[in-house]
Amino acid sequence: MHAFNEKGLAALDPRWAEGRPRLISDDEREFIIATAKIRPAKLGRPFTHWSLRKLTDHLSRNRIRTVQIGRERLYQILREHGISLQRTRTWK
């Protein structure tokens, strides 16, 4: 009642929050994209292509730069940039 008396009908308008603050900075996103575009063998990993699990593990244990990210958020970031972790399959 006090808010209505002070502000009128504006007191009834909900002011929604903008959501949860971003945990991954733009700089970290660029690092994730750059890492996903590099072949794992060039980074000393013993496999030929990335999977979400392998890339998440590599980012969390990287000695140069550590990025803590979940697989679902990693998938969303990669999809936004048009990166697919599936191998190209050819038929002979």
Image (cartoon, rainbow, N blue to C red):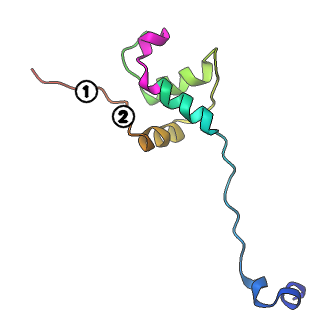
Secondary structure under badge 2? loop
Secondary structure under badge 1? loop
- Confirm whether the magenta stretch covers residue 78: no
Number of numbered discs overlaid on the protein picture: 2
Provide the residue span drawn in magenta.
36-44
Residue placed most toward the observer, 91 or 30 = 30
Q: In this view, does 79 lie above or below 7?
A: above
x and y percent of residue 24 in the render?
63, 39
Q: What residue type is labelled 1?
A: Thr
Report the magenta stretch's main SS: helix
Q: Is residue 50 above or below residue 26?
A: above
Kindly identify the residue that appears in the image at 71 percent across and 81 percent down: 13
Q: Can residue 69 be seen in this view?
A: no
Kindly identify the residue that appears in the image at 39 percent across and 35 percent down: 83
Q: Is residue 2 left or right of residue 76?
A: right
Q: In this view, does 18 lie above or below 37?
A: below
Crowding near the residue tagged with mark 2, few <14, some 14–19, many ≥20 C-alpha atoms within 10 Å: some
Q: What residue type is labelled 2?
A: Ser
Residue 11's label in the rendered image is none
x and y percent of residue 50 in the render?
41, 23
Q: Is residue 51 visible?
A: yes
Q: Quadrant of the C terminus?
A: top left
Crowding near the residue tagged with mark 1, few <14, some 14–19, many ≥20 C-alpha atoms within 10 Å: few
Kindly identify the residue that appears in the image at 76 percent across and 85 percent down: 10
Residue placed most toward the observer, 49 or 28 = 28
x and y percent of residue 12 in the render?
74, 84
Q: What residue does disc 2 label?
A: 84
Q: Is residue 10 left or right of residue 53?
A: right
Q: Quadrant of the N terminus?
A: bottom right
Q: What residue does disc 1 label?
A: 88
Contact between labelled residues 2 and 1, with CB atoms less than 8 Å apart: no
Mark 1–mark 2 Cα distance, whole angstroms, equals 10 Å
